[in-house]
Image (tube, grey):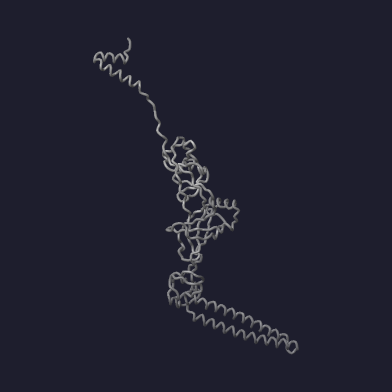
Amino acid sequence: MKPVRPLDLVRLDGLKNGAPLVFAALSLVLLAACEQNTFVPPPPPKVEVAVPVQKSITRYLDATGNTAAIKNVDLVARVQGFLQSINYQDGTFVKEGTTLFTIEPETYKLKLEQAQAAETGAQASVKQAEADFKRQSDLVQRQVVSQATLDTSTSTRDNAQANLQQAQVNTRIAQVNYGYTNVAAPFDGIVSAHLASVGELVGVASPTQLATIVALDPIYVNFNVNEQDVLRIREDARKRGMTVNEIRQLPVEVGLQTETGYPHKGKLDYVSPSINQSTGTLAVRGILPNPDRVLLPGFFVRVRVPYDEQKDALLVPDASLGSDQAGRYVLVVNADNVVEQRTVQTGPLEGGLRVIESGLKGDDRVVVAGLLRAIPGQKVDPQLQKIEPPPASK
């Protein structure tokens, strides 16, 4: 049996329904044959690109530290007696040598006078013994007295000299104890609230703490540096020919948690000779002038140490960087306006811009906006923008 073709069905249907339907079907076939099915691709997506900023930067070692007093001394009663007076206001600043407490000085003054009197008597005994020794020496030479008499005179003279030395020692001890009755400030500083009251017996069994004095100018800042930073800084120092003493003179910049930037300046004061094996860090200490006493012992502070300066460093917006299993990368538009993915090594953050250590050239066009439209290997329509350089560090 011969198969029925679609056109035959149209003819049969036309015979049934009339000529107008046949004409309409033929018109649709002719129109379809005249149409051309061509695909017009969309234009490349627009993305914003910019060349990296070239700028001289200072490399910093950042850390968190805490402040500590350069001097912190407990004031104690070193002699026994009743506390006679307190000669300062709690929490005030005092100068070195200022008398802060007085402990029953009269008793120790009398002991000093007693020792001085004994010393005077010992001096008199020495003079008498010396005179007798000279007389006996002359008499022995003239054979008037025996040698035994001279030996006795010699022994008496030596004993008198020893007694004089003992008396002089006792006088000095009495002077020291008398001096302890006035507790003075050993250096300039702030004195804490007193811990003993007037009339209280102090120094009975052991030294009694009376107060604490703290020196605030200058002040220490202690912080730790991890082992990787230590190795990097030492390598940089070796390349620049810096000695250990020069490293210890590096500046230190400190800022409180509520402050902007690092307004307090000082220098390194101490670097530990060894790494702490428990923490893998190196203990470092800086010293800063603190004339207005803004920094108090025990503050947690932000610390940075400038250790190197790099000229013509490349910086891009931190938001333009991506991450994958290979590390950090940026999207770059090449000369053919095709997007490429570049793996880069990143450095510190400078005012919202990230330093690029390697993997990028100064004339590369980096995608800074429209990252979702920039697909590696595809063309884009780059719109050149300018990156504003970061402000200078304070």
Q: Is residue 371 left or right of residue 358?
A: left
Q: Is residue 20 left or right of residue 140?
A: left
Depth check: give the residue in front, 329 or 36.
36
Res 341 seen here: yes
Residue, far bottom: 144
Depth check: give the residue in front, 143 or 348.
348
Q: Position of residue 342 (x, y in %)?
A: 49, 40
Residue, far left: 17
Q: Position of residue 371 (x, y in %)?
A: 43, 40
Depth check: give the residue in front, 358 or 96.
358
The residue at the point 51 percent across, 74 percent down is 97
The residue at the point 72 percent across, 86 percent down is 137
* Above or below for 161 versus 73: below
Q: Position of residue 394 (x, y in %)?
A: 48, 56
Which quadrant of the figure contains the N terminus?
Answer: top left
Res 278 seen here: no
In which quarter of the view is residue 142 placed?
bottom right
The residue at the point 41 percent across, 41 percent down is 370
Q: Is residue 105 left or right of residue 131?
A: left
Q: Position of residue 309 (x, y in %)?
A: 54, 52
* Above or below for 356 versus 181: above
